[in-house]
Amino acid sequence: MRIISKGKLPASLIILLCILSFKQLQAQTDIDAIMMAKRNICVGPAYSYSSWTNYWEGTYKRDNRNLGRVSTQMFAVMGNYGITNNLNVLFSVPYVKTKASEGTMRGMEGFQDLSLWLKWRALKIKMDKGTFSLFGITGLSVPLSNYVADYLPLSIGLHNKSLSARVMADYQTGKFFVTGSGTYTRRSNVSVDRTSYYTTDAHLTNQVEMPDVASANFRTGLRSKYLIAEVVLANMTTLGGFDIRRNDMPFPSNKMIATTAGVNMKYTVEKVRGLELTAGANQVIAGRNVGRALTVNGGVFYIIDFSYKTKKVISNTQAL
Amino acid sequence: MKRVILPITILVVASTLLYTSCSKAVKGRTDDIPALSPSNNDLNAGTWKTILLSKPNQFDVAAPVATNSPGYVGELNEIKGLQQNLSDDQKNSISYWSAGCVLRWNEILRELVAKHNLPPYQNEDGSYPLPNAANPFSYPEFPFSNPPYAARAYAYISAAQYDALVAAWHYKKVYNRAAPYKFDPSIKTLVPTSDLPSYPSEDAVVAGVMAEMMKLFFPTEVAYIEQRAAEATKSRMMAGANVRSEIAAGEALGRAVAQAFAARGRTDNTGKAVGTQADWSKLEMDCIAKGEKPWLSLETPIRPPMLPFYGKVKAFLFDSATCVALRPGPPPATGSDLMKKETEEIYQFVKNPSREQIRIVHYWADGAGTYTPPGHWNAIAAEDFIPRNYSEIRWARNLALLNMALMDAAIVCWETKYYYFNPRPSQMNPAIKTITGIPNFPAYISGHSTFSGAAAEVLGYMIPERSAAYQSLAQEASVSRMYGGIHYRSDCEAGLVTGKKVGLFAVSRARTDGAD
């Protein structure tokens, strides 16, 4: 509460954050409008816990007592480096562990996918009452290990490579901001361990054609020097894929749709220069062939300034 | 504005490149295989030993009309008409079916098995609905093509195709009608030419068998298969390989033979394979009476055991007494040190599996939503048969032998499973977490091992140079069930041995059926 009161949040948001009360981390990410300053790196560990008991089998919402609660833990190292004030590179190296609370199925764990993002603030226009920024962002992800894709819902990932292109716009006036983005993700096909599978017809191959993904993200809240608090609404939709049939297992190339609503906050500790704490939570509120997951996450980040001109630690919010 | 144009341009270009870069379309392994051009037409196959038919001419096929009759000339004109304006779809259809009708129908059958291989979802009260052949379209659709069901479907359909083709070859030799392109050089031949007499059409025989057998095995697919059958037979006319009367005679013959097999199927005891709650309780009580820990379903809600009386289904290769005689001796007693040791071995396998072990588990899993282990062995066989350029009848004969062995392996295996009613490793030690779904029936003996032992024996006889390879595939299939955490070593070893014994019955038939 001390942390929040420092940010002088509106009462309603404080209550919301208290109810959810998740210590999570989200530092400046590939999907927000925050930039690291030139030659600053922000790096640290992050953790998330995601779980569900209900999932959508096609459009049919159900539970599965042979799985119970399916949980996914992610331990990651994430970082963001300012090449310039307007060009950042971000990375994430996650280790993922899955578990089903009931039934006999064994969980999996391992290093999942390395992701790299290049985030470019292409435009920053000061207006009468605020600042408008436009970003172009590209990303790629590559599996870090030979983990199993075809073991849903307990596989740690889908084992595809991906390339993403994102356009993001941000407007800030005073402490209030609003950010919106749209992303197209091209996914590579994946190999599975079996030589034949059935989708809506038979396939005599171990190659699986993965539908691409379109996603949209909308976030708004307060952004000040030491505190960022936001609510987020997001949707991801595969452009193709097929529904899980009644009582069948999921498959990597399923049609997957998830709409999530969540909150995030980031607090920059005033007394310890460069220290940032992040926390967040989100809930899948609608979906298709995905779990109705509640995810909480948190992280601790430290900003190191490599610029020789200024020795002092700079808050990542400097460029706002 | 310049500052805006540049990034937007770059993003648009990058997105376009992303979207249009290399196509992701995935080809199946048999999508583009060449047309079948048999190295030997097996002209004397009309004398090969039939399975159910008492003699190859048990069903009449009327003599074809003379090739100089107006009727025949009209049929040639129909082909020429079809060939006037072939669409790309029609050309693709010709090319698809020219790879071999026995192969293509086997692939389609595997697809149907995968499509229908889903265990029913429970009712609100935790009970499970049963598929009902009398009401096949209502959920749960009939059938649930689990491994024993699938093994039987593959066997009946393959065996019926074989018998029908023996009959067809008999009549081909009797009537000795050459193919349409031999009579009229203006008919284009869009498939390899052949000296095999074309009356009745072998493609129509096989299509007729398949369409007719759907009524018994996949009643919800009758309409779909009829449409595919029409497509298959039309492709032969468009290709210049058969006239309409050859198709009609072949289809009628195929359907007649299939009806004989379907009649057998309706009285082979499969109808009694499910049993009742009282029957299931008795199996449990009998096991307890022997002083053993009985198998329990590990599903929630508890699911009734899969086809507990399938062991009483009438086999193709031996009688019921032989079936019982093939049952191996008992597994280690559930209270024994040996059982403890075997359970511990499985626990060690699943505690820290290597990636290669997981690959093996998933390569052979063939669980819900797949074409099952018998389907996997059909796929292995088919892909090995393709380069060997067998005649259609040799294709059918080899698949019939393989599938009769697989079905009979399922019968002996199921008889054994429910005779001993032995628990799964996860029941003996709940710390054993499995790497594939745990099947809902007793452990001893392993179905995968029994199927694979039988298949390897049969295929090794047909293709001796691959014999060692088949044995090692069978070994891998067998051990995959231990790596997966769902079978003990005893289940797998006894399964392989038992499967091999079943396979030898098919081999001994193969040695004397006149084909080798």
Image (cartoon, rainbow, N blue to C red):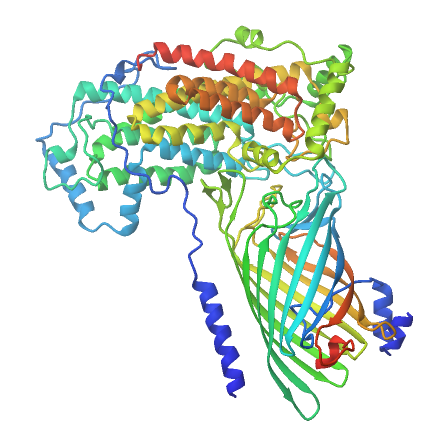
| B77 horizontally vs A122: left or right | left
Asked whether, in this view, residue A244 is left or right of residue A45, the answer is: left
Compared to B71, does A33 lie above or below? below
Residue B267 appears in the rendering:
no
- Above or below, A77 relative to B71: below
Q: Nearer the viewer, residue B392 or B331?
A: B331
Q: Nearer the viewer, residue B257 or B185?
A: B185
- The residue at the point 58 percent across, 43 percent down is A150
Residue plotted at (70% across, 88% down)? A130
Residue B73 placement (x, y as % from top left): 11, 36
Quadrant of image for the C terminus of chain B: top left
- Is residue A20 shown above or below B317? below
In the displayed image of the protein, which residue is found farthest to the front? A308
Horizontal and vertical percent position of residue B135:
55, 35
Q: Residue at x 76, y 70 (%)?
A: A303
Residue B105 found in image quarter: top left
Which corner quadrant of the image does residue A165 belong to? Answer: bottom right
Report whether A47 appears left or right of B150.
right
Task: Tell me the quarter of the picture where residue A33 sits.
Answer: bottom right
Is residue A102 visible in the rendered structure shown here?
A: yes
